[in-house]
Amino acid sequence: MQCLICVNIQDKFVNEIEDANEIIPIVNELLTKFNLVLFTVEPPNFYEESLYPLIHKDIKIENIWGDFYFFKDHDHLNIPSFLMKKNVTDVFVCGLPLDTYIVKVALNMKAYFNTIVIEDATKPINPNINDILKSFKKDGIKLVESWELSQL
């Protein structure tokens, strides 16, 4: 089974990272391709008493045809055990920012799953990402563009 993990796609990050709004339509399209989707969100945008955390207003939850769950960012260490119970083998990661949270989540997931970062569905804070891309390759984390998913 495959899972899409959407990291910090929240107003805070979309507004603060250059061109981050460009990933929103790509993420919305990705939501239609997976039957299991996880959103990680950075507090304080997660409220225990609310049904959903405050993800970016243009994310179309209704595009998800399977199950979806929300995790607080600091709970990312609990995600592998959750996904193992769901028999996940492949994890696809998208979201913000590439050069911090995506790296952290991808490295954590790689210890347990075949991990793929969807490069055009991420944006970095620092545009110089060559070292990050090299480290992904060294660590066995695949990089793909969203259009390549139909070929995997």
Image (spheres, rainbow, N blue to C red):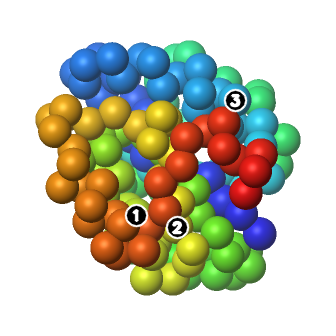
- The one of 71 and 121 positioned closer to us in this rendering: 121
Helix, strand, or loop for circle 2? strand
Task: Report which residue position mark 3 lands on.
Answer: 29
Q: Choose the circle earlier in sequence order: 2 or 3.
A: 3
Question: In the rendered view, does 131 fall on the left or right side of 89?
Answer: left
Residue at left 51%, top 83%?
A: 112
- Spot occupied by residue 144 in the image (x, y as percentages of width and height): 54, 49
Judge left or right: residue 69 versus residue 13.
Answer: right
Label 2 to label 3, Cα distance in Å? 19 Å
Residue 82 visible to an observer of this rendering: no
Tell me whether circle 2 and circle 3 mark residues in contact (CB < 8 Å): no
SS category of the residue bearing label 1 = helix
Calculate the distance from the C-alpha at mark 2 to the C-alpha at mark 1. Answer: 7 Å
**Disc 2 to disc 1: CB gap under 8 Å:** yes
Q: Amino acid at mark 3?
A: Glu
Q: Of 39 and 90, which appears nearest the observer?
A: 90
In the rendering, at what x and y percent does residue 116 appear?
A: 53, 60
At 71% from the left and 63% from the top, the residue drawn is 2
Residue 106's label in the rendered image is 1
Amino acid under disc 2 = Thr
Point out the image quarter for the C terminus. Answer: bottom right
> How many dots with numbers?
3
Q: Which residue is mark 2?
A: 115
- Front-most of residues 56 and 24: 24
Label 3 neighbour load within 10 Å: few <14, some 14-19, many 20+: some
Residue in the foreground of this view, choosing between 74 and 122: 122
| Dot 2 alpha-carbon crowd within 10 angstroms: few under 14, some 14 to 19, many 20 or more | many
The answer to whether residue 110 is above or below residue 29 is: below
| For marks 2 and 1 on the same chain, the one whose residue lies earlier in the sequence | 1
